Image (tube, rainbow, N blue to C red):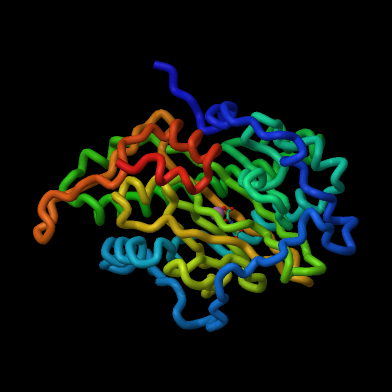
Amino acid sequence: MSTSTLEESFKENPQSPQHILPIDFHLIQEVPNSHLWPNINNFPINHDEKNPNVPIIDLLAPNVVQLIGHACKTWGIFQVINHGISLDFFDEVESQARRLFALPVEEKVKVMRSTSGATGYGTARITPFFSKFMWHEGFTIMDSPLDHAKKLWPHDYQEFCDVMENYQKKMKALSFQLWLFILNYLQPSQEHLINSFEFTQALQLNSYPCCPNPNHALGLAPHTDSLFLTILHQTNNTKGLQILKKDQEWTSITPISNDALIVNVGDLLHILSNGEFPSVYHRVLVDQTKHRVSLAYFFGPQVDSTIVPLVSFDKNVGVVVPKYRKVKVKEYLSLKAKHLEKVFSLIRS
Ligand code: OGA
Ligand code: NI
C-alpha cells in the first residue's frame, strides 16, 4: 500500500507565484494599498486583558484529563504550563527563526515555497482567499529543513537544522501526551483508538515585522487551523494572537509566562469530537514597534487516515447522531484548500 505525506497532499492544489512571495518588509516605510485592510474590526475587541482569559492547564495536575477536556469543550484553546521544555530552548529556536527572517529578500527567495510545495519561505497559505495581503512572512518545515538551510547558509546550516529538528521532536512528544489525554476524555472505554492513527507534523515559523499602520493591517486574517492540535509559542513581550469568542468579540490571548504554550483545537479534532470541541477562529494583529516571531507546531493524523466522528450513547439524549460524514484527511485538506471554512458545510452528514 502506498502512503502519502502531508507534503504530497499540497500538490493537488497549486498556488500562483504572486500569492507566495511576501513583500520586502526591510524596505517598506508605509503600508501599500495591497496590504491596507479598510476595516479589520468586524467585531468589537474585548480590551479586558486579564479577565476572562483562557484556561491555564498544569500538565502535572492530577485531574489533567478533565481539565483539558473541559477547556477543549468550552474554549477550544488553552495555555499549558509545566510541559518540561526550557525557556532557554525556546529562546534558541526563536533566535534561529529571527536569523532566517533577517536575511535579505534575495536570500529568502532561494528557499521560496514552490507553487505546488508545502515547505519553505512564503506567505500564509490562506492568502488567495482574501483581497488584501497580510503583514506576515512564514517558513514551513516538515521534518528536516536541511535542503533549504544549505541554500541559505552553505557553511553554517547545522545549528539551524539541529534546533528545528529538536523542537519538532519535543513538540511531537508533547502533542502525543495531549492527544492521549484528549482521547481519554472523549472515549475512555475505547482504548483501541490509541493505536488507530499514525501522525503527521509541520512547523511554521511566523514573522510579523513592525508595521507603520497596525490599525489597518493584519498579521494573519481570521482562520481555523486544519489538523488536530496546534501548539503555539509566542514571546511574552509582543502579543498579537486573538480569538473570536462566541462569535461576538475578539479577545487577545496573552501568554502568562515566557514559556507558556498556547494549544488550540483544529478542524480535524472538531470533527472527531463530533462538533463538541470548537475549532477556534483566530487572527493575528501587528505592532508598530515590535517585530514579533511565533512558532506554530501543527499535529495531525497521517493524510491517508479517515476521520469518523466519535459518538457515544448519551443518557439524556440516547444515541447521538454524527454531525459530519466520515472523511479522509486528504480529501478534507483538499476541500479546505478550495473552500476554506465553507468546508464544514460540505461534510455535514
Ligand atoms: C498560525 C497561527 C498565530 C500566531 O500559524 O496558524 O494562527 O500568533 N499563528 O502566529
Ligand atoms: Ni492559526
- Judge whether 214 appears above or below 116 on screen: below
Residue at 53% of width from left, 45% of height from top?
340
Q: Quadrant of residue 43?
A: bottom right
For the image, the number of numbered tags is 0
Quadrant in which the N terminus appears: top left
- Judge whether 113 appears above or below 317 on screen: above
- Judge whether 156 appears above or below 63 on screen: above
Relative to 113, is 268 on the left or the right?
A: left
Where in the figure is residue 258, as x and y percent of width and height? Answer: 58, 70
Where in the figure is residue 133, as x and y percent of width and height? Answer: 72, 52
Q: Quadrant of residue 178?
A: bottom left
Residue at 87% of width from left, 63% of height from top?
30
Where in the figure is residue 203, as x and y percent of width and height? Answer: 58, 46
Quadrant in which the C terminus appears: top left
Q: Nearer the viewer, residue 239 or 133?
A: 133
Residue at 38% of width from left, 34% of height from top?
198
Q: Nearer the viewer, residue 216 or 209?
A: 216
Relative to 286, is 170 on the left or the right?
A: left
Q: Quadrant of residue 331?
A: top left
Asked whether the viewer can see residue 153, the reply is no
Where in the figure is residue 38, as x and y percent of width and height? Answer: 72, 64
Q: Nearer the viewer, residue 288 or 171?
A: 288
Furthest toward the top, the residue is: 1
Asked whether the viewer can see residue 189, the reply is yes
Image quarter for ligand 1: bottom right
Relative to 223, is 229 on the left or the right?
A: left
